[in-house]
Image (spheres, rainbow, N blue to C red):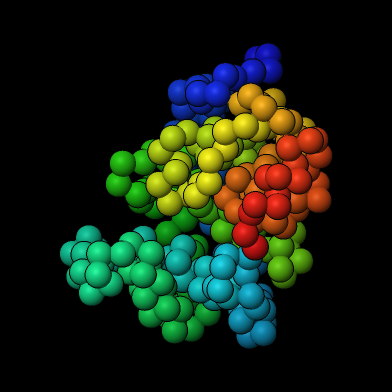
Amino acid sequence: MGSRRQPARPKPHWWSPLTSADHWGAIASERRALADQLDVLSPEQWDTQSLCDAWTVRDVVAHLVLPHKTSIPAFLVTLVAAGGSFSRANVAMTAKEAKRPPTDLAADIRRCADSRTKPPGFGSEAPLTELLVHGQDIRIPLGLEDTSATGSWGAALDFLVMPKARRGFVSRSLQGFRFVASDVDWEYGLGEEVRGPAVALALAMMGRRSRGDELTGPGAPGLVGSAGR
């Protein structure tokens, strides 16, 4: 398959070389690999600041566990208590879940490895992307080995440039950039070029500056400079 040069509008999800079954297989493998790494963390590592806003490693793991334990009625109750704010409801539920012992949180990640839970209105690419990025939120501050497959990051990039990714994943416009992955056959957009590993592109799109030094091209300073932590 040749290089995928795209106009400003993203191609349909089926342009990805991975199928939904591939996504779920990658998710299961990633969860088990992450659980293996969490099993041996020290208390200090669990309390380390992650790349995700004000959350610690423990908070991020709790956030990953929540969708597999929270019923829709329970979430709606919390949402109402949070004044209808999804963000505040998420923070409140994560804080409550994070009070559980780290060993239990790690065990839950492994236990839900084969779960096919996904956000309403999204496909398998959404939980895959969330897991990959939050895995980096945990691994990078702790200096842990990245076990994720490069091909999975290509699928994550396919998702992140879709309009629906603006709902809870990409908070900024990606217009005005031409993204080119250096390690998978993927490119997108029109504008100033930003080139680098797929993982570095995905993190920058989702507001992380980490690995931003791996991005090159005239658009890189603007993309990385506008990102959060």
Residue at screen point 41% across, 38% down: 164
**Horizontal arrangement in the rendering, residue 27 relative to residue 178 (left or right):** left
User: Relative to the observer, which residue lies in front, 178 or 89?
Assistant: 178
**Horizontal arrangement in the rendering, residue 78 relative to residue 27 (left or right):** left
User: Relative to the observer, which residue lies in front, 68 or 3?
Assistant: 3
Could you say where residue 60 lies in the image, as x and y percent from the top left? 52, 68
Vertically, is 137 above or below 180? Answer: below
The residue sitting at the top extreme is 2
Could you say where residue 50 lies in the image, as x and y percent from the top left? 62, 70
Could you say where residue 105 lies in the image, as x and y percent from the top left? 48, 73
* Quarter of the rendering occupied by the N terminus: top right
Vertically, is 49 above or below 195? Answer: below
Residue at screen point 44% across, 35% down: 163
Whether residue 73 can be seen here: yes
Residue at screen point 47% across, 33% down: 162
**Horizontal arrangement in the rendering, residue 47 relative to residue 143 (left or right):** left
Quarter-of-image position of residue 97: bottom left
Residue at screen point 53% across, 46% down: 172
Quarter-of-image position of residue 42: bottom right
Could you say where residue 3 lies in the image, as x and y percent from the top left? 68, 18
Whether residue 106 can be seen here: no
Vertically, is 141 above or below 186? Answer: below
* Quarter of the rendering occupied by the C terminus: bottom right
**Horizontal arrangement in the rendering, residue 183 relative to residue 86 (left or right):** right
Q: How many marks?
A: 0
User: Relative to the observer, which residue lies in front, 58 or 31?
Assistant: 58
